Image (spheres, rainbow, N blue to C red):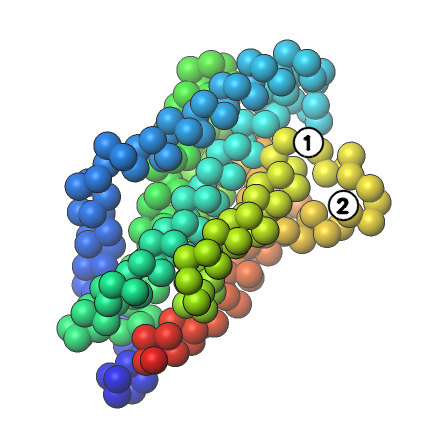
Amino acid sequence: MTYLTSSIWNIRRRSITGIWLRHALAFVRYWKFVITWVLIEPVIVLVAVGFGIGKLVNVVDGADSYAEFVTPGLIMGSAMFHALFETSWNAYNRIENDVYETALTAPITVVEVTLGDILWAVTRSIMTTIGVALVAVAFGWLDGWLAIGILIPAVMVGAMFGTMGFLFSATAPHTTFLTIVFTLVATPLYFFSGSFFPLSTLPNWVEPIAWLMPLTPGVHIARGFALGQLDFTHLWSALYIIGLTVVMWPLAIYLLNRRLIK
């Protein structure tokens, strides 16, 4: 326990890589089950919305079709869910099964644990982003070159929600709490971040709140890349994501450290 607090800010790349590699090997072991959520589920939603709702909706907010408008939002939503799940639900299981406690018997600090997990959360976000983007490109809903740019907000969203996930896993009394988190936090963010409709259609008092939601800037940046319509508002969105991540990370370290000490 003394090691946890005395050298908490001693960061070693080898330790972070080791944590990441541990998660990667676990993923490879169960990839046949995980791939359903990584790729198949978001693709089903993308195709259903693109071909279904897309036939009923006219051109939206500068896009040639509703499918083109909604694709960046769906991709960012998937990136959010994967990153948040990794450091909330999966991290909680690691806490309960003493995975972190075992890791900390080696020369690894809580800071390195969080960084390794966040790095893996970003990796998960990148994986689902690439998979869904390739399908969108195949259907003509996303330009191939512009799709590369979407990786930038995907990494940022993965890091932000990967950090946020620890705020829940480190304080969760049981798994039911995490279920509520996805119901009351992740789902509203998914639907009210501009993924499915322009925020300008919301009531005047709701729109500013929607712009402050953590996923909204990620969707805004991704759509800017997808439609080739980047401006200074996207830079402010990027700074907002970075700011939220920087603020949440020390809190995540503190909460996880306190949980493991107990």
Q: Is residue 151 above or below residue 165?
A: above
Distance from disc 2 to disc 1, alpha carbons, whole Å, reads 12 Å
Q: Secondary structure at mark 1?
A: loop
Q: Which corner quadrant of the image does residue 65 belong to?
A: top right
Q: Residue 228: give x, y in percent of width and height.
A: 58, 29
Image check: 45 left or right of 19?
right
Which mark is first along the chain, 1 or 2? 1
Q: Position of residue 203 (x, y in %)?
A: 82, 42
Q: Quadrant of residue 4?
A: bottom left
Residue density around tag 1, few if under 14, some if 14–19, many if 20 or more, within 10 Å: some
How many discs appear? 2
Q: Work out whether residue 1 or residue 143 is closer to the camera in this orientation and state it.
A: 1
Residue lying at 84% horizontally and 45% vertically, measured from the top left: 204
On the image, the x and y values in percent for residue 60 come to: 70, 23
Residue beneath the point at 42% across and 15% down = 138
Residue 110 shows up from this direction: yes
In the image: residue 198, left or right of residue 39: right
Circle 2 crowding by C-alpha within 10 Å: few under 14, some 14–19, many from 20: some
Q: Is residue 51 left or right of residue 253?
A: right
Tell me the kind of residue under disc 2.
Glu
**Quadrant position of the N terminus in the picture:** bottom left
User: Is 138 drawn above or below residue 173 in the view shown?
Assistant: above
| SS at mark 2 in the image | helix
**The one of 14 and 211 positioned closer to us in this rendering:** 211
Q: Quadrant of residue 188?
A: top right
- Which residue is located at x 35 percent, y 60 percent? 92
Picture layout, residue 81 above or below residue 53: below
Image point (71%, 16%), residue name: 58
Q: Which mark is residue 197?
A: 1
Which disc, if any, is residue 207? 2
In this rendering, position of residue 66 left or right of residue 177: right
Amino acid type, label 1: Phe
